[in-house]
Image (tube, grey):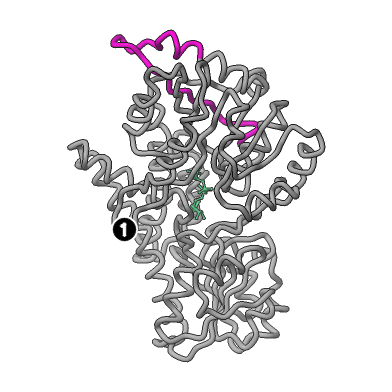
Amino acid sequence: MRISVIGCGYLGAVHAACMAKLGHDVVGIDVDQRKVELLEAGEAPFFEPGLPELLAEVRATGRLRFSTDMAQAATADVHFLCVGTPQVHGEFRADLTYVESAFAALQPHLKPGDVVAGKSTVPVGTAEALAARLDGTGAVLVWNPEFLREGFAVKDTLHPDRLVYGLPTDDDGEPTAVGVAAREVLDEVYATPLADRTPLVVTDYATAQLVKVAANSFLATKISFINAMAELCEATGADVTRLADAIGYDARIGRRFLNAGLGFGGGCLPKDIRAFMARAGELGVSDALSFLREVDSINMRRRVRMVDLAREVCHGSIVGRRVAVLGASFKPDSDDVRDSPALSVAAQMQLQGAHVTVTDPQGIVNARAKWPDLRFADTALEAAEDADVVLLATEWTEYRDLEPHKLGEVVAHRRILDGRNVLDPRVWRAAGWTYRALGRP
Ligand code: UGA
């Protein structure tokens, strides 16, 4: 298939490379000249495990190129919309500016029979409005949400848990003739994962758009649920990690996404639950999602609680104290610092008078751009030099594996805050550290 991918960020760049890996002929298009130049040079513009190797592999086949020129999309028959939908500053709703501009730029290059596949996370109703604009052009819109996780993006795209197609439907809810034709095109695009028995859900526009935000809302709720339990554990002396293990053995509950700690961040979960609430309000069903407000509040409270915990271990004040923060990215194996709990806590402590030094294996460049006033160090040992307290905020493997005696030699006081509940308290206490965590005695 000849494919264009509009938007080459965390989603689009990976999608473009993976489509080429599946054997398609792909052009990735982005308005950011720098990003396109890097990708054209075979370099990933952000940190994503496996992406540099994949880019090298598929670039060598000649099946993948990148351009800033939307006219290049005219050579393709399937067009994936992969642009971002960030939160509008100071509001809950999603900013659709990029979807709008990408779609408008693509439209003059569409021909009859073309399929436009929306992947961006959008408020329900967006697909219907875009589809109406294709009326009479012979091109058709499908909604094909993406569920990849940063850090596992290549694997998730090549071997997805499921595929969802939202097709245009008639009054009986059945796919229209153009919808059926579009489905056949997508089946060809995804021939390899479909042959691997990837489950496929074929549905209408509204359901397909809702699936994505429903999935992220569920994941956010699961994390906030266990973090709410952590608050109860803190009030009772119980251990949230043992509690999560025990309830997680129930297959109906499951252990995944029950890791209590600093909570969720990133460019997806926080803004998606807020945009979903905003959209529910517009649809007159805000009560249905009022629980997401609580999910959001529980999540944000964890960050405040962590600053309080730092104050507690420093005997009531962090003013003038040296704090080492291990981790800046919103999760390990990513350089993404959007709404990162680690950075948010680091910045709060700095604002409250602590001397904060942040380190991260991949996220320092992005973190510095966002919080230039923070101090940065290249390694955990450098960051921890003379520290009064060390906070593990993002569970990179190298931080989980830190040797307490070695770290203990450089700090001023052996106090560790485990923001992700990944360290063994016995080992750290045995090495003379004061160990504190969220939801653990
Ligand atoms: C999330 C979803 O998991 C993907 O399925 C979805 O496609 C993506 O958003 C998106 O909308 O594009 P991602 O943001 O990459 O993926 O990260 P997650 O792995 O979901 O982690 C989100 C946050 O939750 C991180 O800050 C992580 O540290 C935190 N988390 C995760 C916890 O605090 N506890 C857990 O048990 C799991």
Residue 386 visible to the viewer: yes
Q: Is residue 99 magenta?
A: no
Asked if the magenta segment contains residue 168, the reply would be yes
Q: Residue at x 62, y 17 (%)?
A: 188
The x, y position of residue 204, in whole percent, is 38, 20
Mark 1 highlights which residue?
297
Residue type pointed to by label 1: Ser
- Within 10 Å of disc 1 (Cα), the crowding (few <14, some 14-19, many 20+) is few
126 over 247 or under it: above or below: above
Q: Position of residue 426 (x, y in %)?
A: 61, 69
Image coords of residue 313 (percent x, y): 46, 82
Q: Is residue 321 above or below residue 399?
A: below
Does 47 sit above or below residue 351?
above
x 39%, y 51%: residue: 271
Please identify the quarter of the rendering in which residue 46 is found.
bottom right
Looking at the image, which is closer to me, 383 or 80?
80
Quadrant where the N terminus sits is top right
Q: Which residues are magenta?
A: 157-181
Camera sees residue 312: no
